[in-house]
Image (spheres, helix red, strand yellow):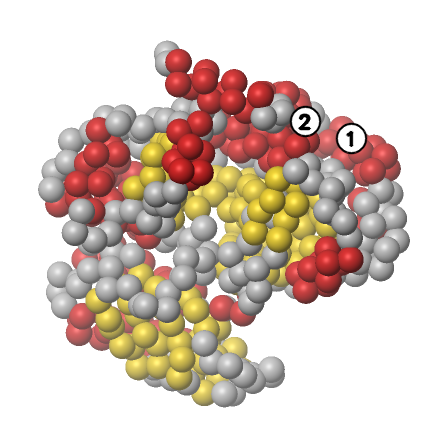
Amino acid sequence: MRGPRYYFTRLFYIIAGLRITKWRKHIVEFWNLEREEQVRAFDDFLLTHKPLNADGVPISASGDVYTSPVLTKSAYRESELTASASGTFNRKTSGTTGEPTKITLRREELSRMLGVRDYCFSHYGVSLGDREARFWARADGGVKSRLKNFFLNRKVCFPVGEDACKSVAKILSWKPDYLYGYASLLLEAAVLVEKYNIKFTPPRCVVCTAETIMPAQKEYLAMVFNAPVAEEYGATEFDILAFECRNGHRHLVNPWLLVRDHHGTLLVTDISRRSANLVNYEIGDSGTIEVSECALLGSAEYLSVLEGRSIHRFVYVTPETRFHSVDLAYAINEYQRLEREIFSFRLIQAEYGEVDIYVSAEPLAGCAALKDYIERKICGRTGNNIVINIYVGVNPEQQAEKSYFVQKIQQPAREVALT
């Protein structure tokens, strides 16, 4: 049974003019429609709104989207500079593709986004307003931030540093209904829980966002926190795009968005946005969309592959030879399962033929063992010999982003051999 704090937060949303319950019901009704009815409803809505594509041409049918040009982030920023802001709420992207992008939203637009979030969370028995333990960057101690967290029934934990164990124990003693945050920080918290045998009431679910998480890491989080783990994929411009169901599919969940992969790059069209025109918006991530028969959540379409920023896909052995960065992730995932240990990691390439791996803790068998294992696996899998450098700790230049691999070679070859 939910307590008064939940209802206080839901009342706060209503007072702010954010009709979450209304849109959540609409979303449930939409995804309960047959596929043909969904397409018809989508096109009817599109015909009413007619957003403009990158050439300024109105879009009145879903088929028009596929023939419209791509809208890049730079082109969107330029269009926003000449347009007058018509929204109430402001957001800003983290700028992992090169430059931050400011997003302005109207109340109805933000309400729809929050309705989608509420719909996704309900799959695991939680709702906006339930107690949220957020594992995020170091908490802002300002009055505005503290008030926001209070009204949203949220507490923030940064499980790194001298007080990490104390912070994790404190936030778990609050008995949060769900845990939410960066995969790397949730893993840090899980390690502390297991190491110091911290007692807590299991949450209803754990939601990982903003970073790629490997299968072995997800299994570890589920074991330590004794709760299902869901992967959320989103963007500041649209909030949640895909959310993982209990069967492991990252379903597309927003009925007002058309998400498609165009030559491996994800493009998003928002047919409900009044404050901006977003048709074939190049979000900056690479992925593959497939169709399943799973009807647990949202659309039958789901993200089968998500590779993060498109500039961070390949490891370069030489200027002419490369292999996919996912091979490195697979090797580390296999090592973790083999050794039955979990650590978070970030891969960075700054020189041809070398990759720096930053791990959150020294492997039990030692850094040399991990280095040797990965080099052998990559050679066997791709036929390439590379040098792996292992470092324990966080890279000072590391930024939280979806990709586990960061490519820093400035001008890789355009036409190279993929091995």
Residue sitting nearer the eye, 100 or 141:
141
Indicate the secondary structure of the residue bearing disc 1.
helix
Task: Check the image and name the residue furthest to the bottom.
Answer: 319
| Among numbered discs 2 and 1, the one appearing first in the sequence | 2
Along the viewing direction, whichever of 399 and 262 lies nearer the viewer: 399
- Left-right relation of 119 to 42: left
Q: Which percent across, then down, holds residue 299? A: 62, 36
- Amino acid tagged 2: Phe
| Left or right, residue 399 beside residue 30 | left
On residue 30, the disc is 2
- Whether residue 186 is visible here, answered yes or no, is no
Q: Which residue is mark 1?
A: 41
Does residue 84 sit above or below 294 in this rendering?
below
Work out how far the residue at label 2 is from the one at label 1, CA to CA, in angstroms: 8 Å
Residue depicted at 58% across the width and 29% down the height: 115
Write down the quadrant of residue 283 in the picture. bottom right
Percent coordinates x, y for residue 359 in the rendering: 26, 63
Q: Which of these two is toward me, 106 or 177? A: 106
Is residue 414 shown above or below 346?
A: below
Residue at image point 46% right, 73% down: 407
Q: Residues within 10 Å of mark 1 (few under 14, many from 20)?
A: some
| 328 to 341, vertically: above or below | below
Residue lying furthest front in this view?
Answer: 143
Residue under the image location 69 percent in, 55 percent down: 281
Label 2 secondary element: helix
| Residue 241, picture quadrant | top right
- Dot 2 and dot 1 residues touching (CB under 8 Å): yes
Amino acid type of the residue that numbered disc 1 sits on in the rendered structure: Ala
For the N terminus, the quadrant is: top left
Instruction: Tell me the residue at 11%/42% (across/down).
Output: 196
* Residue placed most toward the observer, 379 or 64: 64
